[in-house]
Amino acid sequence: MAATITASGTWTTPAIVGKAVGGSGVAFTTPTGTPGGTTTFDSRTSLQKGTNLFDELNQFVTLMAAALGVAPIVVLDTIENMISDMRRQPNMAERSWSA
């Protein structure tokens, strides 16, 4: 049986908001609607400021690494490969995130 992961507490508010754009990808904007930039996904800055959900992602990676007994880089590469495959096969991926 797969692990069940739950969340509690208050999630950080992203400084950038993603929106699916009709099957052609995702557009990122700030909460005020201005186009988002790549600096918003800077992990070092975001972790220092506690923004953009990097704290939550860091906790997830740490939890997964501890559960599997591997280094966090192994988890990051595993997640990256899994996400790449889910993007290549959207019909399969939709099953993963539809509740």
Image (cartoon, rainbow, N blue to C red):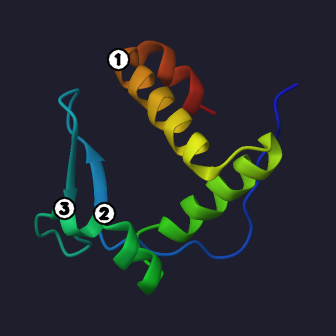
Marked residue nearer the N-terminal end (1 or 2)? 2
Q: Residue 96 bears which disc, if any?
A: none
Q: Position of residue 50 (x, y in %)?
A: 48, 81
In the picture, the quarter occupied by the N terminus is top right
What is the quadrant of residue 28 in the picture? bottom left
In the picture, the quarter occupied by the C terminus is top right
* Amino acid tagged 1: Arg
What is the quadrant of residue 32 in the picture? bottom left
Q: Is residue 42 left or right of residue 30?
A: right
Give the CA distance from mark 1 to mark 2: 22 Å
- Residues under numbered marks 2 and 3 in contact, where contact means CB atoms less than 8 Å apart: yes
What is the quadrant of residue 48 in the picture? bottom left
Depth check: 71 or 84 in front?
71
Depth check: 98 or 25 in front?
25
* Amino acid tagged 3: Thr
Q: Residue at x 48, y 66 (%)?
A: 54
Query: Within 10 Å of the Cα at label 2, are there few (<14), some (14-19), or many (20+) other Cα atoms?
Result: some
- Residues under numbered marks 1 and 3 in contact, where contact means CB atoms less than 8 Å apart: no
Q: Is residue 18 left or right of residue 98?
A: left
Depth check: 17 or 84 in front?
84
Give the CA distance from mark 1 to mark 3: 23 Å
Instruction: Identify the residue position indicated by label 2 in the image.
Output: 41
Instruction: Identify the residue position indicated by label 3 in the image.
Output: 38
Residue 63, compared with residue 53, is above or below; it is above
Q: For mark 2, give the secondary structure.
A: helix
Q: Residue 88 bears which disc, if any?
A: 1
